[in-house]
Amino acid sequence: MYEAKVTIGLKKGVSDPEGANTLKALKLLGFNNVKEAKMIRIVDLLIDGESKESVRKSVEEMCQRLLTNPVIHTYKIDIVKK
């Protein structure tokens, strides 16, 4: 059993309206020391697999087919044996 954590963010140059609104709200609340806010998604998956490599290959396919849009997203996969 493996835990796969996929961290999904936006590519450089892609608009992040959620992050911009969060930054604006923080500044309105007086947190003027915050210079940037980015929104990311984390998907935690618990997967049965024969090896870390086979699980990574499966998660990579999940990212390409469903979890991310390769035009606008970047992603990082971390896998830990449970």
Image: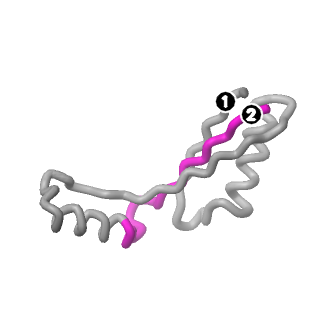
Span shown in magenta:
1-18
- Residue 20's tag is none
Q: What percent of the width, then of the height, locates residue 51?
A: 81, 29
- Residue 80's tag is 1
Does residue 66 appear left or right of residue 69 in this picture?
Answer: right
Q: Residue furthest front?
A: 29
Q: What percent of the width, then of the height, locates residue 31?
A: 16, 56
Q: What percent of the width, then of the height, locates residue 45?
A: 70, 45
Say whether residue 10 is magenta.
yes
What is the spatial separation of the Cα atoms under label 1 and label 2, in whole angstroms?
6 Å
Say whether residue 54 is magenta.
no
Disc 1 residue type (three-letter):
Val
User: What residue is disc 2 on?
Assistant: 2
Disc 2 residue type (three-letter):
Tyr
Does residue 37 appear left or right of residue 48 in this picture?
Answer: left
For label 1, the crowd category at 10 Å Cα-Cα, with few meaning under 14, some 14 to 19 and many 20 or more, is: few
Quarter placement of the C terminus = top right
Q: Secondary structure at mark 1?
A: strand
The answer to whether the residues at label 1 and label 2 have Cβ atoms under 8 Å apart is yes
Does residue 44 appear left or right of residue 16 in this picture?
Answer: right
For label 2, the crowd category at 10 Å Cα-Cα, with few meaning under 14, some 14 to 19 and many 20 or more, is: some
Q: What residue appears at the point 73 percent right and 47 percent down from the top-left corner? A: 59
Task: Relative to 3, say whether 24 is above or below.
Answer: below
Task: Relative to 81, say whether 18 is above or below.
Answer: below
Q: What percent of the width, then of the height, locates residue 10?
A: 47, 60
Q: Secondary structure at mark 2?
A: strand
The quarter holding residue 24 reads bottom left
The earlier-in-sequence mark between 1 and 2 is 2
Quarter placement of the N terminus = top right
